[in-house]
Amino acid sequence: MQASPLDALHDVMPPSEVSWWPLSPATWAVIAALFIIITLLIVWRYRIWQHKRAKREAISQCEQHQHDAQQLHILIKRLTKHYYGNQAVAGSNQLWATRLTKLSGQTFNAQELDTLYSPQPSAELAPKLRLAIKNFKLKEAIDV
């Protein structure tokens, strides 16, 4: 009896599994790029958060002086001075009313702001100033 040619074949040996370590240079480049991008995003968001800190502080102080229009006016002037410099708050009352209208989205006029310096400030000015502080624009171009 003749031997079968299949008996001469040996079992198939599967290759050993390929290790995932060490990583390829392309994988290291992707990991480094992701790390740099995430770091830059964190720094960028932190700077934005820091930039808005003065406005957050003004809003929290605004809650303490809800009905005091003079204190609210001081807060919004300090906020404007912080973000736009001394020149933005300097000038006539009419110029300040125009800038305040542009920066807050509320409509202010010089006569309305003049009542702040009277013995009895206008009662309806306090809610308007509170809303102006909350809606204060941080990146508005103003002509100084």
Image: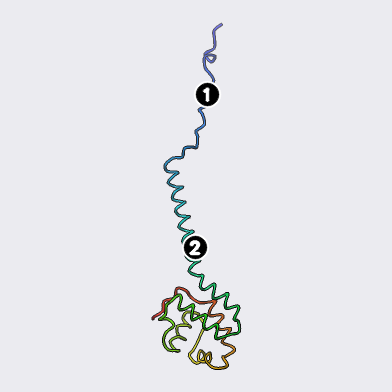
The x and y percentages for residue 96 are 45, 85
Q: Quadrant of residue 67?
A: bottom right
In front: label 1 or label 2: 2
Against 6, residue 31 (above or below) is below
The x and y percentages for residue 68 are 58, 85
The x and y percentages for residue 44 are 46, 62
Against 100, residue 32 (above or below) is above
Where residue 4 is drawn, which disc sits there?
A: none
Against 66, residue 6 (above or below) is above
Q: Residue at x 49, y 63 (%)?
A: 46
Disc 1 marks a residue whose amino acid type is: Met
> Helix, strand, or loop for circle 2?
helix
The x and y percentages for residue 19 are 50, 34
Q: CA distance from mark 1 to mark 2?
A: 57 Å
Quadrant including the C terminus:
bottom left
Q: Residue at x 53, y 92 (%)?
A: 115
Quadrant including the N terminus:
top right
Residue corresponding to mark 2: 46
Give the class, few, some or many, for how many residues have Cα within 10 Å of label 1's Cα (few <14, many ≥20). few
> Helix, strand, or loop for circle 1?
loop
Residue corresponding to mark 1: 13
Residue lying furthest bottom: 119
Disc 2 marks a residue whose amino acid type is: Tyr
Against 27, residue 3 (above or below) is above
Question: Nearer the N terminus, badge 1 or badge 2?
Answer: 1
Q: Is residue 66 left or right of residue 107?
A: right
Residue lying furthest left: 144
